[in-house]
Image (spheres, grey):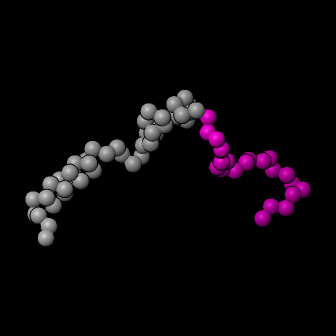
Amino acid sequence: MNNPARLLSAGLLLGACLLLSEPAEAFRCGSKLVVDGMHEAEVIAICGEPATRRQIGYAVRPYDPRRRYR
């Protein structure tokens, strides 16, 4: 059978570890911490240039009356 005092101490240790953990909206880059809301230039200064980039958004093109728009 399990010892109730041992279960209680294990539960308290687990709870303390959860309270001391860093927020989920942060990550480490080497020994430095990058948090949500930092400017892109700050992140690049800490972590360096990314290995890959993904384009997000769309291109704005001038209106062409000869082209059929849907």
Instruction: List x then y, in percent, for residue 32.
Output: 44, 32
Q: Against 61, is 69 above or below?
A: below
Tell me if residue 60 is in the magenta stretch.
yes
Q: Nearer the viewer, residue 27 or 41?
A: 27
Magenta region, main secondary structure: loop
Q: Is residue 18 left or right of residue 27?
A: left
Q: Quadrant of residue 20?
A: top left
Q: Nearer the viewer, residue 61 or 11?
A: 11
Q: In the displayed orientation, state which residue is furthest to the bottom.
A: 1
Q: Against 44, is 69 above or below?
A: below
Instruction: List x then y, in percent, for residue 9.
Output: 15, 54
Residue pictured at 43% horizontal, 35% vertical: 33
Q: Is residue 28 left or right of residue 17?
A: right
Q: In the displayed orientation, state which residue is furthest to the top.
A: 45
Q: In the displayed orientation, state which residue is furthest to the right.
A: 66
Q: Against 44, is 66 above or below?
A: below
Quadrant in the picture for the N terminus? bottom left
Q: Is residue 18 left or right of residue 49?
A: left
Q: Which residues, given as a range, are shown in magenta?
A: 49-70
Instruction: List x then y, in percent, for residue 52.
Output: 65, 44
Q: Is residue 66 left or right of residue 35?
A: right
Tell me if residue 44 is in the magenta stretch.
no
Q: Is residue 38 visible?
A: no
